[in-house]
Structures are given as structure tokens and as C-alpha cells.
Image (cartoon, rainbow, N blue to C red):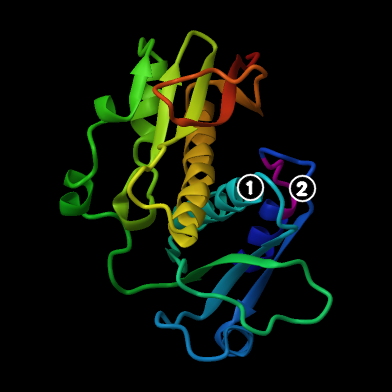
């Protein structure tokens, strides 16, 4: 029943860039082994597989979709784990390209971030700048909780009265494609947290790309979140 509810939840999602074609599968371990040509390092009962046409912003979308699923599953007591190292070597015929996957299932062990993991994160003041008055400060404190590959926290935020501008750190050290791939997914993950956090404080989020792009410390502009107060 939970999987059926998850399918309904994901099917109703409005993604940040809705011009991109995407879909998903929920596969058991046996089917996951078939498309990755081996046994995943983390063996779980179920895998959420996210697929999309490979064009600009597709990774951002995929990160958003995956993390919205993670937040939904966590709220229902289900453990999750992003599977960034998995690649589909032989996917099913006639499907969109494989982007990423998330393992999930019931767990007898704690599956939330531990206090020690949280303590290793960069401080909010290191990633978010600008007008941090309430409730924007509280929204950013919740957005700060978003996970990232290797806990690198590559997403930066410039906050003004009505918008939160989102950037990806212009990493001048790590240039190889897989690293950038993960960090583009991280942007979408952060956007999911931002949307859920804003909703908690009564705001609807409209993701948009401004032109000209707002510059900030030579970081890579990704999107802007327009905060619209919901009517009560």
C-alpha cells in the first residue's frame, strides 16, 4: 500500500523544469541486479529508479524528484539511501536514460542522520548569504539539512525579500565529470528541502531561471525560488 501511495505522490509532482521528459520505476532487488549487471553494494528490498531525457537541468530535476521521495519515505518510517555509484549497464528496452537510483526499505536500525554527521556539516553562514530575517532564516535552517554527495555541500544561496537564488559552487579543483554529475543532483536535492521548508512557513515556491542571471561570487547560477505567501 505504501508503494502505491509513493507512486501516486511522485506521479503528481511538479518538477522545477517541467519541460523535461522524465519517469520512474520501482524495482525489486532481482530486477535491479539485471540492469546494473551485478549485485548492488547496498542490497535493499526496493529501488526507486529515476529516468530522464539527458538535457540541461535534467540532473537538477532528478535530484529534486529523488529527494522528495526520500522525504516522503522517511516521514512514513522507511529507510533510504542514494545510490550514486550505481550505473545501468543494460536497462530495459524502450525506456528513458537512467539517471540515478535510491534504495529503500524497512530498517531495524536508525536511519536518520546522526548528531556526529550533522556536526560535520558546514555552518549555515558558510553557504547562505543576504537578507536572513524571519521566516527566511528558518526556511534556510531547514534547507541546510539537505544531504549531499560526500557531504561536500556545494549549493550556495543568496537570499532577498522575495527570492532565494540558488548556485552551485564553482569548483576549481575537482573538474571530472562524475563529481559535477553528483553536485548537479545535489542542487535538486537542496531544492526539494527548500520547497518543503517554505511550505512549513506558509509559502508556495515557484522555481524559475532569471535573465540576466544574478551574479554571486563567480558561482554557477542554477535557479531562483520565488516565495509566494499562501492565502489562508
Instruction: Tell me which secondary structure the magenta stretch mostly adopts.
Output: loop
For residue 29, above or below residue 84: below
The residue under the point 71% across, 39% down is: 17
Q: Is residue 13 magenta?
A: yes
For residue 75, above or below residue 226: below
Percent of width and height locating residue 3 = 63, 67
Q: Which residue in the structure is indicated by mark 1? A: 61
For residue 1, above or below residue 116: below
**Crowd class of label 2 (few under 14; some 14 to 19; many from 20; radius 10 Å):** some
Q: Which residue in the structure is indicated by mark 2? A: 20
Percent of width and height locating residue 10 = 68, 54
Residue 224 occupies which quadrant of the picture?
top right
Residue 126 occupies which quadrant of the picture?
top left
Judge by depth and name the residue closer to the eye, 206 or 158.
158
Marks 2,1: beta carbons within 8 A: yes
Dot 2: element: loop
The residue under the point 36% across, 43% down is: 172
Q: Quadrant of the N terminus?
A: bottom right
The residue under the point 63% across, 59% down is: 6
Is residue 40 found left or right of 6 in the rendered image? left
Is residue 142 found left or right of 222 in the rendered image? left
| Stretch of the chain drawn in magenta | 11-15
Dot 1: element: helix
**Crowd class of label 1 (few under 14; some 14 to 19; many from 20; radius 10 Å):** many
Is residue 212 found left or right of 118 in the rendered image? right
Return the residue found at the far right.
94
Judge by depth and name the residue closer to the eye, 215 or 131.
215
Tell me if residue 110 can be seen: yes
Percent of width and height locating residue 104 = 48, 70
For residue 59, above or below residue 29: above
Amino acid at each position: 500500500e505504501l508503494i502505491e501511495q509513493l507512486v501516486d505522490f511522485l506521479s503528481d509532482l511538479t518538477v522545477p523544469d517541467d519541460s523535461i521528459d522524465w519517469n520512474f520505476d520501482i524495482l525489486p532487488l532481482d530486477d535491479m541486479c539485471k540492469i546494473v549487471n551485478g549485485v548492488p553494494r547496498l542490497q535493499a528490498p526496493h529501488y526507486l529508479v529515476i529516468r530522464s531525457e539527458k538535457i540541461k537541468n535534467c540532473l537538477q530535476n532528478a535530484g529534486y524528484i529523488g529527494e522528495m521521495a526520500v522525504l516522503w519515505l522517511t516521514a512514513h518510517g522507511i529507510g533510504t539511501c542514494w545510490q550514486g555509484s550505481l550505473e545501468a549497464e543494460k536497462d530495459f528496452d524502450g525506456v528513458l536514460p537512467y539517471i540515478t537510483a535510491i534504495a529503500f526499505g524497512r530498517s531495524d536500525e536508525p536511519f536518520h542522520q546522526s548528531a556526529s554527521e550533522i556536526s560535520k556539516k558546514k555552518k549555515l553562514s558558510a553557504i547562505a548569504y543576504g537578507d536572513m530575517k524571519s521566516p527566511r532564516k528558518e526556511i534556510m535552517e531547514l534547507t541546510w539539512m539537505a544531504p549531499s554527495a560526500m557531504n561536500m555541500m556545494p549549493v550556495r544561496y543568496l537570499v532577498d525579500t522575495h527570492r532565494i537564488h540558488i548556485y552551485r559552487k564553482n569548483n576549481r579543483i575537482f573538474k571530472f565529470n562524475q563529481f559535477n554529475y553528483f553536485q548537479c543532483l545535489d542542487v535538486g536535492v537542496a531544492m526539494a528541502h527548500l520547497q518543503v521548508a517554505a511550505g512549513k512557513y506558509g509559502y508556495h515556491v515557484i522555481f524559475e531561471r532569471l535573465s540576466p542571471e544574478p551574479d554571486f561570487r563567480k558561482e554557477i547560477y542554477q535557479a531562483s525560488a520565488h516565495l509566494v505567501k499562501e492565502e489562508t
